[in-house]
Image: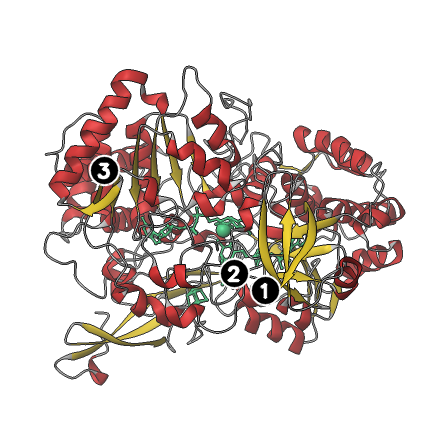
Amino acid sequence: MSTDVNSASDSERVTFRTCPLCEAGCGLAITVKNNEVTHIRGDMQDVFSKGFICPKGSTLKQLHYDADRLLTPLIKRNGVHVPATWQEAWQVIETGLSGVINEHGRESIGTYLGNPGAHNLSSMTFNRVLLQAIGSRQRFSASTVDQIPKQVSSGMMFGSVSSVPVPDLDRTQYLLMLGANPYESNGSLCTAPDFPGRLEAMQARGGKLVVVDPRKSRTAEQADEWLAIRPGTDALLLAAIANTLASDGLNVLEQRLHNYLNGLAEVVAALAPFTPEAVAASTGIDAATIRRIARELRDASSSAVYGRIGTCTTAFGTTASWLVDVVNIFTGNLDRVGGAMFSLPVAGSGNTHSAPGRGKGFRIGRGHSRVSKHPEALGEYPAAAMAEEIETPGDGQIRAMVVVGGNPILSTPNSQRLAKSFEQLDFMVSVDIYLNETSRFADVVLPPPSQLQRSHYDLALLTFAVRNVANYSEPVLPLAPGQLDEWEILAKLSAIISGAGIETDPSVIDDLAISSLVQSAIKDSASNVFGRDHQELIAELSLSGRRGPDRILDFLLRTGPFGDGFGAVPNGVTLEKLIDSPHGIDFGALEPRLPEVLRTPSGKIEIAPPQLIADLARLLLTLKNKVDESQLTLVGRRHLRSNNSWMHNIEVLVKGKDRCTLQMHPDDASRLGVDKDSKVLVTSRVGSLEAPVEITEAIRSGVVSLPHGWGHTMEGTNTRVATARAGVNSNILTDEKEIDPLSGNSVLNGIPVKVTRISHN
Ligand SMILES: Nc1nc2c(c(=O)[nH]1)N[C@H]1C(S)=C(S)[C@@H](COP(=O)(O)OP(=O)(O)OC[C@H]3O[C@@H](n4cnc5c(=O)[nH]c(N)nc54)[C@H](O)[C@@H]3O)O[C@H]1N2
Ligand SMILES: Nc1nc2c(c(=O)[nH]1)N[C@H]1C(S)=C(S)[C@@H](COP(=O)(O)OP(=O)(O)OC[C@H]3O[C@@H](n4cnc5c(=O)[nH]c(N)nc54)[C@H](O)[C@@H]3O)O[C@H]1N2
Ligand code: SF4
Ligand SMILES: [Mo]
């Protein structure tokens, strides 16, 4: 099993698990002595990370022992949160939510699902159950302050939102990276432990890294070339790169890709106005450079374009995300070794189910939000619209919120307005490990166990991995008596909300969940269990005694592309096999998947989706705006020792010099009379805040940068370390009215701001 017997004495053991903090998914080796975690280091034998970890990985220990981490439910009494028993908590929730449902209907319950859920097997398997039980369309999540544009563009092009091409990092010879900073973030929508090491290996084998970023980030510093783009203009740059390739004749587009394309002539025609000359002033990148980059991408022995947060969190997030793959197609590098490729996830995904090569496809706008009529995307509405949905009276007004592992008060735009709206809620439940900026509004806070007390498998992130890898981790530490696993909390909440009552055993909900999964697989003619007997499969799955997410995972693995099909495929993968492989199993490098990966109705790549072609007209209009050199714009930044808003209560991660500073170019500083000891007032359309200034050449002039996730000064929280190093909340400045109209994603970068000096410290 996952214990290193050789190095273990009676009371000391080393267990192995995947770090759940970010998308890299590094293997950890955790030493436990007398049931206390003593040491966490990188697992040298992990098949994917081979010993690499970042400074956050070892802090799972501090996180587990954090005195502020919640161990019992909290109930708000007379405005103050007090510890309570689970029974009391369920009771208050039943009364509170059924009151709201009886009076206002199910539509009045909103949900917000946060980012840690994407790294959490319980949420990945039971959030859906909870959403179904609630039965409201008022769904929000961290997706609409993050990656949803890439999923929408992928859905439109390839037919499934799981079909996000990832750069083939280990084999590419040229990487054009826009709006990503893996030296700090360790990568996103491209699961690759030691992303920096993989980039350096590419350079060492003669490959080239070009980084497009308004800041000279650590990644840009390492790059062979840095293009200091004006914020929010990546779609223009990509359109001009595609335009150049099309004008040059697309000679590299061999038959291999041609066969699979629908709409090539249309997209080429629509890109015609976006010449390098036309976009040069807006993007701040000269025409000759744009042409050269386009041709380098085409002429490299292999190349990939990769865009992340900086391309997604803009007004043209979906269009930029689409154009990334248009360029990958135009250079002939989509689905090619060393290019942008599709993973084949071991536990399956939206592009491994149902008949290969063709499907129902994807669309947005199957409904519209109540107040501003935003189109639905991936079953949810923009987080930016949450406040208005809570504030605006009428049928379907949100009266209660259920928040799972999210901190929207710090993470989503115009936080002050959102915080005000939360005050107005009739009832709120938070499932969270801390009493923080968001959970402080909750009538009941339900604490899941720590990251070390649960099993783990990266169901979501391995869908975007640069190798096909599977790695399961058993809990390192047991649950305390009476403590509930997160899936049990979610199942119980589901039962209560659906009216089944607080005495419902979570296992009843679990049985229903697995049963419906099995049911749909045995009806899927493409599944390796098509036509099998429902009861027989359930019985086999239940033999091991595992329940909840583990049993569901076992099913997904066995019916996945490498699965044993319950005996149908000799030597196929099962959960037991993964348990016997504590360092993971590597199923190899990515392989071309066209056309099997497609799930579009046409069975082709839709390279010219009508909504995206139409959006080019909106993009073209931006070229009419005269570039105002005096207008400062705000962008964000991430730091290695931070994780969105919630790892700030770990002393070792926050100690040292203040990182929550407003970075500014020396030219702007002198123009504004700001020097290195200044504090400034930063003002946007929606708010203002004070921040210390950091003057640096590592940012484009005209651009200022403030990290997000800080501002731990709010009343009613209990995160003492974070509060002592509070920083300021950059989302006081971001504007909830500015969204990408297709995906509903918030514009979090390129915010027009005014900066004035206020004082010397
Ligand atoms: N240490 C750490 N790691 C993390 C996280 C964290 O908070 N801390 N968060 C995790 C999460 S949830 C995510 S989604 C990923 C994100 O991972 P990345 O996408 O790598 O995120 P960032 O580090 O924010 O990098 C975004 C870059 O875009 C630049 N940028 C801003 N505006 C523009 C623009 O208009 N155009 C271009 N081209 N660039 C622009 C910024 O300067 C910044 O360098 O990181 C994950 N990993
Ligand atoms: N201005 C600006 N804003 C941004 C971004 C940006 O680049 N700039 N980035 C955006 C991005 S990419 C993201 S992903 C979002 C994140 O947005 P959110 O998901 O809303 O915020 P997080 O900071 O990740 O908060 C996670 C919450 O989950 C809790 N938590 C941690 N682990 C667990 C767990 O295992 N179970 C449960 N139930 N709770 C847990 C934490 O205590 C915390 O309250 O922020 C976005 N906001
Ligand atoms: S890079 Fe990400 S997954 Fe790896 S140790 Fe750091 S936080 Fe954990
Ligand atoms: Mo994110």
The location of residue 239, given as percent across then percent down, is 77, 44
* Mark 2 vs mark 3: in front: 3
Q: Observer-nearest residue: 1 or 78?
A: 78
Cα separation, mark 1 vs mark 2, equals 7 Å
The location of residue 154, given as percent across then percent down, is 58, 41
Whether residue 250 appears in this view of the structure is no
Q: Is residue 591 left or right of residue 288?
A: left
Disc 1: residue Cβ within 8 A of ligand 1's nearest atom: no
* Residue of label 2: 466
Disc 3 residue crowd, few under 14, some 14–19, many 20+, Cα 10 Å: few
Element marked by disc 1: loop
Question: Of label 1 and label 2, which has the lower sequence position?
Answer: 1
Looking at the rendered structure, the kind of residue marked 2 is Val
* Residue of label 3: 78
Looking at the rendered structure, the kind of residue marked 3 is Asn
Question: Of label 3 and label 1, which has the lower sequence position?
Answer: 3
Question: Which disc is residue 636 wearing?
Answer: none
Element marked by disc 2: loop
Give the total of numbered labels: 3
Question: Of label 2 and label 3, which has the lower sequence position?
Answer: 3
| The quarter of the displayed image where residue 202 is located | bottom right
For the point 60% across and 75% down, the residue is: 201
The location of residue 267, given as percent across then percent down, is 76, 36
* Mark 3 vs mark 1: in front: 3
Looking at the rendered structure, the kind of residue marked 1 is Leu
Element marked by disc 3: loop
Q: Do the residues labelled 1 and 2 touch (CB within 8 Å)?
A: yes
* Residue of label 1: 169
